[in-house]
Image: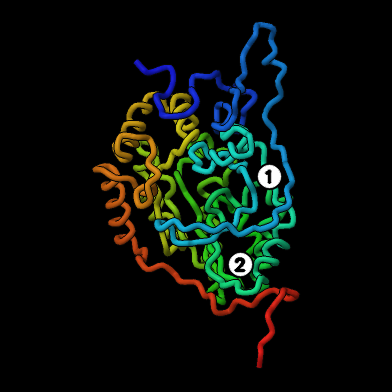
Amino acid sequence: MLPLAPQVQSPHSSDSPGVAPNRRRGRAAASNVSGRFEKFQRVDLDDGWGALDDLPPFRTEIVHEKPRTLITRNESPDISFDRSINPYRGCEHGCVYCFARPTHAYLGLSPGLDFESRLFVKDGAAEALRRELASPGYQPKVLAIGTNTDPYQPIEREHRVMRGILEVLAETSHPVAIVTKSALVLRDLDLIGPMAEKGLIKVALSITTLDRGLARTMEPRATTPQRRLEAIEKLSQAGVPTAVMVAPVVPGVTDHEIETILTRAFAAGAREAGYILLRLPLETQDLFANWLLEHFPDKYRKVLSLLRSSREGKLYDSAWGRRMTGTGPYAWMIGRRFELASERIGFGKARLRLSTDLFTPPEGGERQLSLF
């Protein structure tokens, strides 16, 4: 008999009532439980007077903020970059498994439905970036964009924050690596193409599944898998180095698709590939487990068991060197399958190195004059 609530390690109980389906149509999360820093829990509760029937559906709300700085730096030894940019906070794609969801708790919001419906737009991002790149002593290294929330999520069509950032990077010949689930990246080919000719850019499309129905429930507002493959094809035809991220690999749900995704992406023109085993930090554990119970109740026990087998008995292990790929027999098997398929299909092991030699600080920046 299945438990009524996911047995996960979380600071909040997951047995709180979920949000009614008609209020969360087109969203992945089933609840909007308060974040871990909040003193009180906020839940929908039917008091018998029909109050829940009067609540409106979750609609996308925009909050504007003006950042003083834009580049985030890290010292994580298991990732290939030390600086990144996030044009937005929150992500309308609504991927239920997104490891960035817990960051909304820092804003006093829920990592659940708030994360995919209450979004923060960084106004003046291009100007902030220009100031940072013009700082005396700035040393260029590859900037990673799309590592937390997607820079080409739907609201980018209107707000164009990523477009402004890319214009600054193109102007200064600064190297950048982009990861996205959106075909909207093709809009910026007029900038991406010339940057690719200079060896300044590469783009990775993240593909979790090729099953359109599964994608609709798991990542409801992201570009369909087929259109992501088409984006890879158009980018590669334009001379842009492209990669595919089989990410995340969801045990018992999408793991059987690894080889097919790699094959389709290579045929479309991708020449680099990577994968990440499903990561479920903090509140994401409850959100994903509840999603499993709603959409795959027959796989609930199997999926969580496979996750625990690859995370030393836990649903998540944040230790560097293990958080991306896991440990144990199942994780080892996923890694070997990925490696063998990549080699057989033709993906190269070497990563394209982007150029930093062409960087030119923005005009108008404070520069130290030469003594001679």
Q: Residue at x 55, y 54 (%)?
A: 146
Q: Measuring from the top left, give residue 322's x and y in whole percent.
A: 34, 48
Q: Amino acid at mark 1?
A: Phe
Circle 1 SS class? strand
Residue 332 lies, with reference to residue 51, above or below; the image says: below
Q: Residue at x 64, y 68 (%)?
A: 169
- Asked whether 230 or 35 is in front, the reply is 35
Which badge, 2 or 1, is on the more N-terminal residue? 1
Q: Quadrant of the N terminus?
A: top left
- Asked whether 214 or 252 is in front, the reply is 252
Q: Residue at x 51, y 49 (%)?
A: 226
Residue topped by disc 1: 120
Q: Measuring from the top left, give residue 49's x and y in whole percent.
A: 69, 7
Q: Residue furthest front?
A: 371
Between the C-alphas of marks 2 and 1, the distance is 25 Å
Residue topped by disc 2: 192
For residue 184, what is the image quadrant?
bottom right
Q: Residue at x 66, y 75 (%)?
A: 361
Residue 259 lies, with reference to residue 83, above or below; the image says: above
Q: Residues within 10 Å of mark 2 (few under 14, many from 20)?
A: many
Q: Residues within 10 Å of mark 1 (few under 14, many from 20)?
A: some
